[in-house]
Image (spheres, rainbow, N blue to C red):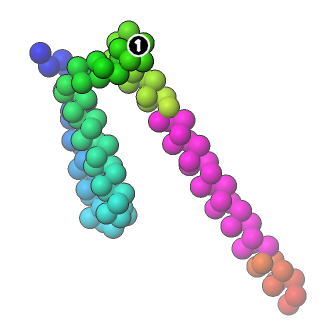
Amino acid sequence: MVLGIQIAGFLFGLFMVYYSFINYKRREFTVKEFSFWLFLWVLFIIVALFPSILDPIVKFGGFFRALDVLIVSGFLFLIAAIFYTYTIMRKNQNKLEIVVREIAMKNKKK
């Protein structure tokens, strides 16, 4: 029996596949990025429709329910995504600082 949360997960997954496709068509995603997100969203849709796929992971990991696996996986993904975003932001900040210093030095010489 399909529950309401499964339907919501399926619709969310379909929307994200569409949104990823739109970003690809706008050339905001490369083929590699689009393939990654497409794989991730299709996997999300499959797990939303067939949560029993997670039963081996639940038993192996010592979890009580599949929802526990999803919550832990979600937290791990968010932590990794935040860390990755932070490292990218720091690199951009350092590059910007170098450019600002160079501009300031050029203006000082004038």
The residue carrying mark 1 is 63
Please state if 6 lies on the left or on the right of 76 as rendered: left
Any magenta on residue 85?
A: yes
**Residue 59, percent across and down?**
35, 14
Question: Which image quarter: residue 44?
Answer: top left
Neighbours of disc 1 within 10 Å: few (<14), some (14-19), many (20+)? some
Label 1 SS: loop
Note whether 61 is above or below 48 in the view shown.
above
Extent of the magenta region? 77-101
Please state if 99 lies on the left or on the right of 88 as rendered: right
Q: Residue furthest top?
A: 64
Q: Main secondary structure of the magenta part?
A: helix
At 28% from the left and 46% from the top, the residue drawn is: 39
Q: Residue furthest right?
A: 109
Q: Quadrant of the image for the N terminus?
A: top left
At 81% from the left and 77% from the top, the residue drawn is: 104
Q: Amino acid at mark 1?
A: Phe
Say whether residue 109 is visible: yes
Note whether 81 is above or below 72 in the view shown.
below
Say which of 80 and 109 sits in front.
Answer: 80
Q: Residue furthest bottom?
A: 110
Say whether residue 5 is visible: no
Please state if 96 lies on the left or on the right of 64 as rendered: right
